[in-house]
Image (cartoon, rainbow, N blue to C red):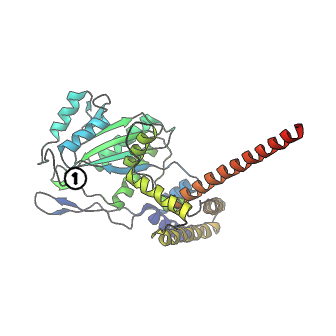
Amino acid sequence: MREIDGVLRDWGEVASKTAAKPSKGRNIAGGKYKKPAKTPHISAMAAREKLAATVRKAPEVMVKISGGGKDMRGIKAHFDYISRNGQVEIEDEQGRIHQGKEEVRDVRDDWKGGGIPYESGTKREAFNIVLSMPPGTDRAAVKDAAREFASELFSNHQYVFAAHDDEKHPHIHLAVKAVDLDGVRMNPRKADLQQWRETFAEKLRGQGIEANATPRQLRGVVKKAEKQSVRHINRRHREGKGGELARVTQSQQKAVEREVKEGQKHINPAQDNISAGRKQVQQGYGAVARALAAGAAEDKQLALEVVQFVQQMPPVETRHAEQVEAVKRGMAREQSRAVQKDQGRGGERKDQGRSR
């Protein structure tokens, strides 16, 4: 049992990325640093629950920083966006509800303190955070979980959040003032984002919603999620609302065309690291499965699920490789249709010759 618990804790540390330290925040008043909160170690029971949720593919939370204003002009634009120009209510850190252009403007004016310039700012003065869950998740529960999430993590900051119901997946836009009430500027890094995911998943589970927060590598996911700004630009273009595709998308398409049409192989400098990472993940799951297989019946069942989960992992394929294969399949279908069309025409000519 001790061996199983030890292996589970090791896996849990990796799954929660608790080995990475959260960032320090700089005190803009005195130049001192505020010590980050200590990262709690995961228990064997918590690791077992996370492992079971992962291999049974529980819904994964999404928490990301989508941007942030460097001045009041940028903050105003984001407030207008998340409030839909005052049509959608926003809630602040004190639980007060604001709706309408005038009330949103009042909140914005309240943020002006602390020396935030109106325009031409050079430092990020606000963080725009998006919290979301898959389609079908109870929207009210997501909003309640987001409220608890913000209250716990940003209790010493000014913030506002709004729920958007215009897309299938329920999501919350949370804007947090970068400098807290003690003058400490927030400086989130990767480890912080993972802790945020863990906290949001915990708050959702408290609302009775099944939620998990496992790094994508441990789920066998290779491709990074597309940035929200890129997705919006591309959607506007494809819906005929103006503008070109995002520059990064255009660059990706050109690389795909060069490989398909000219045979110019695209070299991904991260490919070796991606493959090595997958191997390390599989070895980690293997160690867990072997330890569980020596345990009780319940452990053996979980070991079997772990093995099946690893076997079902998608291939290590980048977005570029996936797009190349999609283009090749499309070209093959077109060629097949062209051949069938030519064969049909040949049959028609033969029939016409016989009738003469």
Q: Position of residue 317 (x, y in %)?
A: 55, 62
Dot 1 falls on a residue whose secondary structure is loop
Amino acid of disc 1 = Arg
Residue appearing at x 43%, y 53% in the figure: 250
Q: Position of residue 343 (x, y in %)?
A: 77, 47
Image coordinates for residue 110, horizontal then vertical, percent: 16, 38
Closer to the camera in the image, 143 or 300: 143
Q: Which residue appears at 33% of the width and 47% of the height?
A: 129
In this rendering, is residue 57 above or below 100? Answer: below
Q: Residue furthest front?
A: 356
Q: Is residue 222 visible?
A: no
Q: Nearer the viewer, residue 299 or 57?
A: 57
Q: Residue 159 location in percent, x, y?
A: 25, 43
Residue 111 versus residue 237: which sits nearer the camera? Answer: 237
Give the quarter of the figure containing the C terminus.
Answer: top right
**Quarter in which the N terminus is drawn:** bottom right
Residue 166 visible at all = yes
The residue under label 1 is 124
- Residue at x 34% of width, y 51% of height: 65
